Amino acid sequence: MTHIVEIKGMNKYFGKLHVLKNIDLTVEPGEVVVIIGASGSGKSTLIRCVNGLEEFESGKLVVDGHALAPRGGNQKALAEIRKEVGMVFQQFNLFPHLTVRENIMLAPMKVKDTPKTVANATAERLLNRVGIGNQADKYPSQLSGGQQQRVAIARALAMEPRLMLFDEPTSALDPEMIGEVLDVMRELARDGMTMMVVTHEMGFAREVADRVIYVHEGQIVEQGKPDQVFDNPQNERTQAFLSRVLAH
Amino acid sequence: MEFQFQFDWQAAIDSIPFLLKGIPYTLLISFGGLLIGFLLGILFGLLSINKKWFLRWPATAYIEIFRGTPILVQVLFIFYGLPDLIGRPIDPLTAGIAAIALNSGAYISEVVRGGVQSIDKGQTEAGLSLGLSRSQTFWSVVWPQAFRRMIPPLGNQAIVSIKDTSLFSVIGVGELVRQGQVYIANTFTAFEVYFVVAILYLAITLSLSLLLRALERRGVASV
């Protein structure tokens, strides 16, 4: 029961398409797991199952002791899981009608009944932590992409999650802004946050990951320490993928 | 042959006090009807995008029926037809408000549906991922954004409905057109009076347009 995520024999279909095939995966508290793989391999779908944004058809999925049932069953567990699991999206998905501060205060106030003054103090502390303390009263559209993504991270952290999911957090960013977002994530990892990260940033994976998982056509075909996966991949699919992404 | 007609300014001016008496009715029917129509529109618009077919189907039926039949037929049906069914007369004002409400409600349902569906799915996902319930996500994340996008088409519908009230002269509500008809029956100054009637409608719709444009600008500024 020490696992924060436990997935056993999980299968997921989009209609007839079998997108996740018999996934077994456990994540321990404090661990940083980076999931790599080609587009359409199912890696995003995998982490979206963890907080119930995607339903799965069969198998077992337990997050911090809350068991999700296939096909969106067990809504109670799902509600608990979503309170404990934060998520950062490729497209940021900030709320454009709210200021940066309000974006961060919304969930604690609505979900946890946090008093406004407390939520506000938390928002300011988190914005300082991600390095944009002076932008609190702007609207998301007034910020750069990198700043928006850092707000999105702060927004997720405001719920004091036990696990953070990152779904290609730098893929929509201009190259010069990728670094500032990865810096924030690196720091989070250093502070002991449990993280599942889907990314194409191989440098980040090598440096920050405790474990790298390679997903190919809905299956975990290889996993291990970054050095092991990157420098000495065992599976030929992994070798082919890495030679393509690391070549340039 | 010489052209005999001359616009009689004095007749036009004289008609104004009498015509103005119709404006409270026009406004009451329009805005009373639109207010109820807006509530109907929210209700049926949201039902029409519900996943459950037994909620979606009646909403779709309502929308298709009231969009697909003329408002004149609707108001005649309510005023002359319904009393047969319920066994007592319906006063013209109530019939007018009900017709605007039901008719605009159908169009506003579509406006609501379009507005809500135009909001990116990522917004809902972000709300849910933060632990907000489905209804919290909808009302604090999706709806405020959707509503802002709904302002222009709602304004459009308001203007259409204001003009539609002119049809209710046929059931004898003392609104603007009815007042005009009554006045003309005594003075035979149709050209002047209908000209003034048109100007008065324009005054109402233009004020509304300006108001909505100001509202829109404020909405846009904060996004």
Image: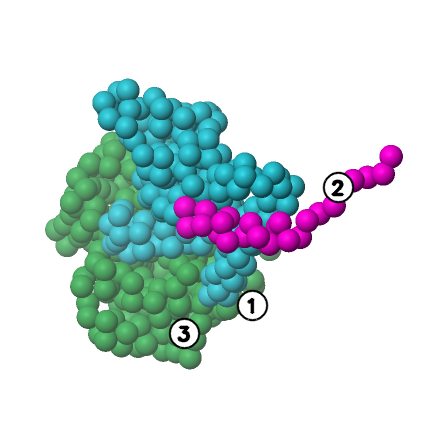
Residue A230 % position (x, y): 44, 54
Q: Nearer the viewer, mark 2 or mark 3?
A: 2
Would you name the residue on which mark 2 appears?
B5
Q: Is there a contact, CB below 8 Å, between mark 1 and mark 3? A: no
Q: Are marks 1 and 3 on the same chain?
A: yes
Residues drawn in magenta:
B1-26
Circle 2 residues within 10 Å: few <14, some 14–19, many ≥20: few
On screen, B171 above or below A120?
above
For residue A15, say whether it is visible.
no
Q: Colour of chain B?
A: cyan
On screen, A39 above or below B216?
above
Circle 3 residues within 10 Å: few <14, some 14–19, many ≥20: few
Q: Colour of chain A?
A: green
Residue at 27% across, 41% down? A24
- Please, what secondary structure does the residue beneath circle 3 have? loop
| Residue A168 or residue B72, whichever sits in front | B72
Would you name the residue on which mark 3 appears?
A137
Q: Amino acid at mark 2?
A: Phe
**Residue with the most extreme top position:** B84
Residue B119: in magenta span: no
Q: Nearer the viewer, mark 1 or mark 3?
A: 3
Gap between marks 2 and 3 measured at Cα: 65 Å
